[in-house]
Image (cartoon, rainbow, N blue to C red):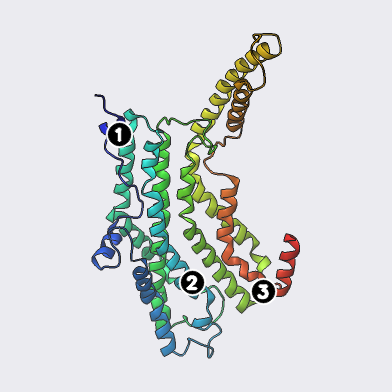
Amino acid sequence: MTSSPHDRFPAPPDFSVVLGGPLYQLLRRTRLSDDALALVHRRILAAVLITWAPLLVLSLLEGRAWWGGVTVPFLVNAEVQLRFLLAMPLLVFAELGVHLRMRHLVGQFFHRELIADEDRPRVKAAIDSAMRLRNSLAVELALIVVIYAAGIPMRDYIAVDASTWASGTAAGWWHALISVPIFQFLLLRWYFRVFIWGRFLVQVSRIPLELIPTHPDRVGGLGFLTNVVYAFTPILLAHGVLLAGLIADRIFFEGAKLTQFNVEIFGGVAVLVFLLLFPLMAFVGQLARVKRVGLGEYGNLAQRYAREFDAKWLRGGTGPAETLMGSPDIQSLADLSNSFQVIREMRVVPFSKETVLQLAIVTLAPVAPLLLTMISFEELMKRLLSAVF
């Protein structure tokens, strides 16, 4: 009795760029996470208590939490509130979503039979390499060194050029030495995780994949990769929140106009969406080849079938008992035409224009409320309704 490939090879391991690393191990020991990255609410609460709560307490003690003595009190500093109360929780929350979407990624390559049996060792080598980077103590220490050695925390992270609650105060020092570095570490670690994800895809893209040009997803069977990309949307949303906070402070305290930040808004969105989708472009070469070969092969097949159909039904090739009514030939011709159309519509990148638009909208969403600084809510609703109806 012969064994199937599934019997000869073990099931592919779970793949996750977030389920590991020194910080993950520390969170497990402190009961802020379990083995599956649950207990997200605990991690968010701990992060807020370490980064934001001390700023509130110290600014209250120093009389700079509310109006009085400074141009920008703590509680009305939009950039700081949004950074630590919304953007940072989003960065923490994103870990669980990315893990759940990504864990069965490798299995999809095998279940869809995109990887030949002889290439399984190459996939395993790519997985092992990615996991070594993810679990590296040296990398996380390097991120901390970069944050502090580069002097980043000592910069004034208040977005306005005015006297603020952080100017020369204990709250300001905590903000510069503790709160901002923690946030930066979470952010830089996400950039590194995206790098690991992209590096893994590049390694897999060098393996000859068994792509199908007629696959209904229009990307040869790689459509599942887009589902993983959507798991990163909280990261895009967090960046949008950061941008909204920076712009809001400039508008509220310096009289700036939203239109002055068009380059920052649209340029930032374009860069973020590009960086997230760029790893998927590693498959462009294989997808373009599969589409080109598919068009040629199915074109030849269509030519032969169309010629035989023409000879049979239009040139007197049918027998006396054959009738066009009820013949499967018509349906076969239509099916072949549909298959050829699917190949023509096949994309050479494993994402669509709709994906790009949706990711851009998510990133822009936090900035949208700032439109109310230029136009009243009632007028804005009238224009939106008139555009829709």
- Residue that mark 2 sits on: 157
Residue at 36% over, 66% down: 40
Mark 3 residue type: Thr
Q: CA distance from mark 1 to mark 3?
A: 60 Å
Tell me which label, 2 or 1, sits earlier in the chain.
Answer: 1
From the viewer's side, name the closer residue of 138 and 371. Answer: 371
- Residue that mark 1 sits on: 6
Instruction: Place residue 309 in its image quadrant.
Output: top right
Mark 1 residue type: His
- Residue that mark 3 sits on: 373
Tell me which label, 2 or 3, sits earlier in the chain.
Answer: 2
Q: Nearer the viewer, mark 1 or mark 3?
A: 1
Mark 2 residue type: Tyr
Location of residue 103 in the rendering, given as x and y in whole percent from the top left corner: 36, 49
Mark 3 closeness class: few <14, some 14–19, many ≥20 residues within 10 Å: few
Q: Nearer the viewer, mark 2 or mark 3?
A: 3
Tell me: residue 284, above or below residue 329: below
Tell me which label, 1 or 3, sits earlier in the chain.
Answer: 1
Residue at 42% over, 71% down: 154
From the viewer's side, name the closer residue of 214 and 271. Answer: 214
Q: CA distance from mark 2 to mark 1?
A: 54 Å
Left or right for 31, reference 198: left
Residue 336 shows up from this direction: yes
> Tag 1's secondary structure?
helix
> Mark 2–mark 1 contact, CB under 8 Å?
no
Give the quadrant of the C terminus: bottom right
Q: Nearer the viewer, mark 2 or mark 1?
A: 1
